[in-house]
C-alpha cells in the first residue's frame, strides 16, 4: 500500500533519478554479490563475499543481539504529535503514517530491557528506515526514559544508534531533544551506570552531537558514516575532494574518536564482555 | 482569519487523515485542503513576512556581536585564549570580567564585522571543535571558582569542514553540553542573533535561556530545510514560515524563558540601547538563580530540558 503514495511533485524537483539504477536491496553495493533473503539474514546481513554490512532494522537487531525471548519492550505506546502542524510537500502526519505502515514501528527507536549472554541491560535500538532514524520528541523521550530505567534497575545501558539527525518536522523541539538526552546521560553518570554506545551506519548530525558520542565505551560497525555534517555539504563548503573514508568509522578510529570497530558477528560477544567487565568491577 | 471556512477545512482534513488510506486520491485531496488552509490561515499567526524579517535582522551585517555587548556590559574584561591542545578558535570568544559587580565568565560566538577579511578571520561565527573545547575549559574555571556563566549564542552552525570532522565536531558539541549540564554555578544563555542548530545548542544548556526579539533559533537554517524538504533552497521563506524560528514561537513552545526587547528597528540601529536591554534581562535572570545552591542549579537545569518535547496523548 505504502508504495502507492503519490509523490510526483517531489520527484519533479528531485535531482537526476538515483532510483533508476538502484540495485535490489539484497545485492551488495560493494561487490554485487546477491543473496536470498534467508541467506542474508542467517549471515547477520553481512556480505559473505566482501564483508559489507547491510543495514539492519531495529527488530532484527534485537534478535541478533539479545538472548532469545529476553526482550521486554517499554514505552511502546509513545507516538509523535505534530506540534507545528508542519507541512512541506506533504504533511508531517502523513509522513509518520507512511513510516508506520512501512516499518511496523511506532517511531525510530525501540526501548526496553533484555539480556545479552545472560547479562541484564537496558537497551535502545534505532531504525533508520523510520524517517531516516530522525530524532524527534518520541526518540528523545524514549532515550531519556531508558536512562531513568537503567538507573532504577541499576543495570547498564546499551544504545544501538542509526540516525540521520534531528527530525526537522518538529522544528526547534527536535533540537531540544539533543540537550534533553545529554542531561539524561549526565544523570546516569552521576549514578555510576555504565553506558555503551554502538554506532551503526549511518549515525550523523544531531545524534553525534548528543548521546551517541557520550558512551563510557563507544564502538562502531565497519564502514559506519559518523560525521556531524554530511560529506556532500562539507564538499560544497570546502570545494575540494574529500578523503576516501571521510567521516567513516575507520577515519574516526584513526583520529581517536572511537574505542573500537567491531564486526557485526562479534558485536554480541563484545557487548557481553563489556557488560561482564563493568558488572564485576562494581 | 480563523473563520468558519478554516474550521470546516480543518474538520475535513482531520477526517481524511483518520482514514489512514495512503492512496493517491486521498493524498491529493489532503494536499489540496492543506493548501487552502495555508492561504486562509494567516490571520492570527505571524505572517511569512514577519518571520522572514526576524531571519534578516538576525543575520544583519550591522547587528551587534558578542564583543560589542562585552564592551558595553562587562568591566575589567580579560579574554582567555586557546584550548590547551591544538589552537585558538577565533569564532568563539571566552573570558572573565565583572558584570553587575560580580565576576562572571562570558562565552560567545563571534562573527567578524566589515570586509571579507574580517569575516573570514572569525569564520563567520562557525566554530571548529577546538572552539568548543576552549569554551569548556573556561566553564570549568568558572565552576571551580563559583563564577556565573553567561553564554551569547550567534552562529549559523558548527563549521562543516574536513578538519572539523576529523577533530570530532559532533563529539565536541555533545561534550560542551555535558559540561554545561554538570556546572554548579548559575548559567544564562542568550540567543543574540542566529541560533543555528548544534553549534547553538552547545552553549544553550543553561538554567535560563533568553532570546532577543529579532533573533532566530532553529534546528536547521531555512535554506537547509528548504533544500532538503522542498528540494529547492530558494524556498527558504516558505521553510522559515513552516518551522517558525522566531522568538515568539520559541516562547510559545517553552523553549526559551523570555524575550529580550530590542530598540525599535532592531539591535543594529542602536548598540547602546540593545546592550542596556540585554544587560537588564541577564541581571534579572541571574538574580532569580542566586537563591539556589549548586546541586539545585544542576537539577533545575536538567529538569528544564527533561520537559521539552510534545508526545501524542
Image: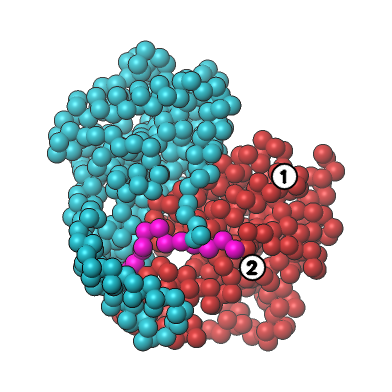
Image quadrant in which the N terminus of chain B is located: bottom left
Q: Secondary structure at mark 2?
A: helix
Which circle's residue, 2 or 1, is located before the other in the chain?
A: 2
Up-down: is B6 above or below B51? below
Q: Is residue A120 left or right of residue A208?
A: right
Closest to the observer, A199 or B216:
B216
Name the quadrant containing residue B144. Answer: top right
Q: Is residue A194 left or right of residue B107?
A: right
Residue A46 pos. (x, y %): 68, 73
Residue B67 pos. (x, y %): 30, 28
Name the quadrant containing residue B32. Answer: bottom left
Q: Write the start and end of the magenta stretch as one range.
A: A77-89
Q: Residue at x 36, y 87 (%)?
A: B25
The residue that disc 1 covers is: A152
Q: Colour of chain B?
A: cyan
Q: Is residue A79 magenta?
A: yes
Q: Secondary structure at mark 1?
A: helix
Identify the chain of the residue marked 2, using the numbered disc in the image: A
SS majority, magenta: loop
Residue B132 pos. (x, y %): 47, 37
Up-down: is B19 above or below A95? below
In the picture as drawn, the residue positioned furthest to the front comes out as: B4
Q: Residue at x 46, y 79 (%)?
A: B20
Closest to the observer, A159 or B232:
A159
Q: Nearer the viewer, mark 2 or mark 1?
A: 1
Q: Colour of chain A?
A: red
The residue that disc 2 covers is: A58
Asked if the residues shown at circle 2 and circle 1 are in contact, with their CB atoms under 8 angstroms apart, the answer is no
Q: Residue at x 64, y 68 (%)?
A: A58
Closest to the observer, B301 or B84:
B301
Q: Is residue B127 magenta?
A: no
Residue A277 pos. (x, y %): 82, 46
Amino acid at each position: 500500500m505504502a508504495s502507492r503514495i503519490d509523490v510526483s511533485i517531489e520527484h519533479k524537483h528531485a535531482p537526476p533519478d538515483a532510483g533508476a539504477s538502484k540495485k535490489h536491496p539484497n545485492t551488495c553495493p560493494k561487490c554485487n554479490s546477491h543473496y536470498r533473503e534467508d541467506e542474508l539474514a542467517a549471515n547477520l546481513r553481512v556480505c559473505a563475499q566482501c564483508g559489507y554490512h547491510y543495514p539492519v532494522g531495529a527488530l532484527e537487531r534485537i534478535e541478533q543481539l539479545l538472548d532469545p525471548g529476553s526482550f521486554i519492550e517499554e514505552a511502546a505506546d509513545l507516538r509523535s504529535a505534530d506540534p507545528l502542524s508542519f507541512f512541506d510537500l506533504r504533511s508531517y502526519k502523513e509522513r509518520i503514517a507512511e513510516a508506520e505502515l512501512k516499518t511496523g514501528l511506532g517511531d525510530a527507536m525501540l526501548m526496553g530491557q533484555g539480556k545479552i549472554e545472560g547479562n541484564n541491560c537496558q537497551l535502545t535500538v534505532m531504525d533508520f528506515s523510520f524517517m531516516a532514524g530522525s530524532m524527534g520528541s518520541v526518540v528523545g523521550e524514549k532515550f531519556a526514559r531508558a536512562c531513568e530505567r537503567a538507573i532504577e534497575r541499576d543495570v547498564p545501558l546499551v544504545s544501538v544508534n542509526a540516525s540521520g539527525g534531528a527530525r526537522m518536522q518538529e522544528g526547534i523541539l527536535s533540537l531540544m531533544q539533543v540537550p534533553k538526552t545529554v542531561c539524561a546521560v549526565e544523570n546516569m553518570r552521576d549514578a555510576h551506570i555504565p553506558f555503551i554506545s554502538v554506532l551503526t551506519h549511518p549515525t550523523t548530525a544531531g545524534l553525534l552531537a548528543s548521546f551517541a558520542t557520550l558512551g563510557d565505551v563507544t564502538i562502531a560497525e565497519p564502514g559506519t558514516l559518523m560525521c556531524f555534517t554530511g560529506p556532500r555539504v562539507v564538499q560544497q563548503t570546502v570545494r575540494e575532494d574529500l578523503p576516501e573514508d571521510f567521516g567513516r568509522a575507520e577515519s574516526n578510529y584513526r583520529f581517536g574518536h572511537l574505542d573500537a570497530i567491531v564486526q557485526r558477528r562479534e558485536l554480541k560477544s563484545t557487548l557481553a564482555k563489556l557488560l561482564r567487565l563493568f558488572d564485576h568491577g562494581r | 482569519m480563523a473563520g468558519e471556512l478554516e474550521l470546516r477545512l480543518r474538520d475535513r482534513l482531520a477526517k481524511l487523515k483518520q482514514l489512514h488510506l495512503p492512496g493517491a486520491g486521498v493524498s491529493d485531496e489532503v494536499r489540496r485542503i492543506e493548501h487552502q488552509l495555508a492561504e486562509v490561515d494567516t490571520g492570527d499567526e505571524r505572517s511569512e513576512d514577519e518571520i522572514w524579517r526576524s531571519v534578516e535582522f538576525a543575520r544583519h551585517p550591522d547587528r551587534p556581536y558578542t564583543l560589542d555587548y562585552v564592551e558595553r556590559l562587562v568591566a575589567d574584561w580579560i579574554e582567555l585564549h586557546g584550548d590547551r591542545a591544538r589552537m585558538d578558535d577565533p569564532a568563539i570568544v571566552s573570558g572573565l570580567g565583572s558584570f553587575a559587580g560580580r565576576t562572571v565568565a562570558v562565552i560567545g560566538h563571534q562573527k567578524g564585522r566589515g570586509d571579507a577579511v574580517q569575516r573570514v578571520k572569525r569564520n563567520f561565527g562557525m566554530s571548529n571543535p577546538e572552539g568548543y573545547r576552549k569554551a569548556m575549559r573556561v566553564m570549568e574555571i568558572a565552576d571551580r571558582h563559583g563564577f556565573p556563566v553567561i553564554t551569547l549564542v550567534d552562529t549559523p552552525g558548527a563549521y562543516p569542514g574536513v578538519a572539523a570532522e576529523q577533530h570530532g565536531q559532533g563529539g565536541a558539541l555533545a561534550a560542551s553540553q555535558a559540561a554545561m549540564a554538570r556546572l554548579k554555578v548559575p548559567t544564562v544563555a542568550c540567543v543574540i542573533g542566529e541560533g543555528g542548530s548544534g553549534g547553538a545548542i552547545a552553549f544553550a544548556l543553561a538554567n535560563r535561556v533568553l532570546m532577543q526579539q529579532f533573533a532566530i533559533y532553529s534546528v536547521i537554517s531555512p535554506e537547509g530545510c528548504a533544500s532538503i524538504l522542498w528540494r529547492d533552497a530558494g524556498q527558504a521563506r516558505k521553510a522559515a514560515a513552516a518551522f517558525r524560528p522566531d522568538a515568539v514561537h520559541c516562547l510559545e513552545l517553552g523553549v526559551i524563558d523570555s524575550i529580550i526587547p530590542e530598540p525599535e528597528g532592531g539591535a543594529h540601529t542602536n548598540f547602546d540601547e540593545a546592550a542596556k536591554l540585554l544587560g537588564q534581562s541577564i541581571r534579572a535572570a541571574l538574580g532569580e538563580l542566586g537563591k539556589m545552591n549548586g546541586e539545585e542549579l544542576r537539577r533545575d537545569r536538567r529538569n528544564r530540558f527533561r520537559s521539552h518535547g510534545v508526545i501524542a496523548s
